[in-house]
Image (spheres, rainbow, N blue to C red):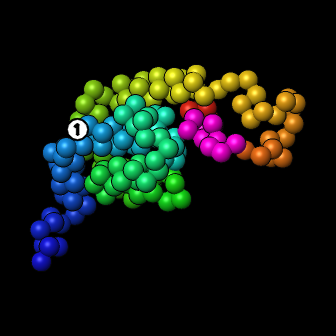
Amino acid sequence: MKLNAFPPGLDSLYKRIVEQICNSDNANLCKRILALIAIIYQPITLKELTSLVEMLKDISSDLESLGEIIGLCGSFLTIREGTIYFVHQSAKDYLVKHASAKIFPNERTEEQQRIVSRSIEAMGKALQRDVYSLQHPGCSIDKVEHPDPDPLAPIRYACVY
């Protein structure tokens, strides 16, 4: 049986998944995504992911391809309604406690600095005066039709945190 090929316990299973990711053709991209998702304050959308991971900026409008890339992250992540989550808190805990040397090769601090830098860069490109064409400062944005695609969607996380 295939089930017998998996070692008992979640840590053993997660270790095996990390090894498969590290040996894959997409190892750098997957590790970058896992590192990002492990240290952000709240789950992010696929669009927000593209503004925080440099390697994904060219496919920001292709949500299907982004979903496939998340699928390459070895069952650690799942997507619900366009938002990326860990499949379980134990998956995040394992990455942070036991696999940090593999997904944070230069410490968490460097990844946090990368997130800040990418956030500032993304906001610098997207933010502009009257981005929703309200024309009247102070009017309720709830009554305004949001442009499609929403120019603020990729930078929501960056703007909040």
**Residue found at the very far bottom of the displayed protein:** 1
Q: For the image shown, how many numbered marks are present on the structure? A: 1
Above or below, 128 relative to 148:
above
Q: Nearer the viewer, residue 105 or 155?
A: 155
The reply, left or right, for residue 114 in relation to residue 15 is right
Above or below, 83 relative to 96:
below
Within 10 Å of disc 1 (Cα), the crowding (few <14, some 14-19, many 20+) is some
Q: Which residue is mark 1?
A: 102
Q: Nearer the viewer, residue 34 or 148?
A: 148
Does any portion of residue 93 appear in the rendered image?
Answer: no
The reply, left or right, for residue 59 in relation to residue 146 is left
Q: Nearer the viewer, residue 32 or 13?
A: 32
Q: Name the residue at 41% across, 57% down.
A: 78
* Amino acid at the residue labelled 1: Lys
* Quadrant of res 114: top left
The magenta stretch is 147-157
Residue 80 position within the rendered picture, expressed as x and y whole percent measured from the top left: 49, 60
Q: Name the residue at 88% across, 30% down.
A: 136
Residue 68 position within the rendered picture, expressed as x and y whole percent measured from the top left: 36, 53
Residue 97 position within the rendered picture, expressed as x and y whole percent measured from the top left: 29, 43
Q: Name the residue at 31% across, 58% down.
A: 75
Q: Quadrant of the N terminus?
A: bottom left
The reply, left or right, for residue 142 in relation to residue 108 is right
> Is residue 39 one of those drawn in magenta?
no
